[in-house]
Image (cartoon, grey):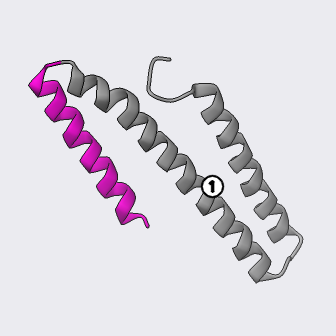
């Protein structure tokens, strides 16, 4: 594993989300009730947030942990800064 995430598992999750989005498109094409469409949009948002949290968790467990245990203060500081910026971006989107 090059990065902190399982590439195959991530791609599988992304394909499922992609299928959900295609389902929403079909609902729009079929003139489905707006609330039903909004419910599916919320499900996609939840799936994307879950995926983002998993990536963030894996980043901490792998990349940040490796940097902190490396003994290189510059690397540790860079990864800590990167982590906080990612958390801030994620928090702003919520």
Name the dominant secondary structure of the magenta segment. helix
Q: Which residue is mark 1?
A: 47
Q: In the displayed structure, would residue 85 be above or below residue 9?
A: below
Which sits in the foreground, 36 or 83? 83
Q: Is residue 15 left or right of residue 1?
A: right
Number of numbered discs: 1
* Label 1 neighbour load within 10 Å: few <14, some 14-19, many 20+: some
Magenta stretch contains residue 87: yes
Dividing the picture into quadrants, the one containing residue 71 is top left
Q: Residue at x 23, y 34 (%)?
A: 79
Q: In the displayed structure, would residue 58 be above or below residue 8?
A: below
Residue bounds of the magenta highlight = 71-94
Q: Residue furthest right?
A: 30
**Quadrant in which the C terminus appears:** bottom left
Secondary structure category for the residue under label 1: helix
Give the x, y percent position of residue 87: 33, 52
Q: Residue at x 73, y 67 (%)?
A: 40
Which sits in the foreground, 57 or 92? 57
Q: Residue at x 79, y 77 (%)?
A: 36
Which sits in the foreground, 28 or 47? 47
Q: In the displayed structure, would residue 20 be above or below residue 57?
A: below
Give the x, y percent position of residue 92: 35, 64
Dividing the picture into quadrants, the one containing residue 7 is top right
Give the x, y percent position of residue 20: 75, 55
Q: Residue furthest left?
A: 73
Q: Residue at x 56, y 47 (%)?
A: 51
């Amino acid at each position: 594993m090059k990065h902190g995430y399982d590439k195959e598992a991530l791609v599988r999750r992304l394909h499922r989300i992609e299928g959900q989005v295609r389902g929403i498109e079909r609902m729009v094409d079929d003139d489905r009730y707006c609330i039903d469409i909004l419910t599916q949009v919320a499900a996609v948002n939840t799936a994307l947030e879950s995926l983002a949290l998993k990536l963030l968790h894996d980043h901490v467990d792998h990349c940040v942990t490796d940097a902190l245990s490396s003994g290189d203060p510059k690397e540790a500081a860079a990864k800590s800064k990167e982590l906080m910026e990612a958390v801030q971006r994620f928090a702003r989107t919520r």
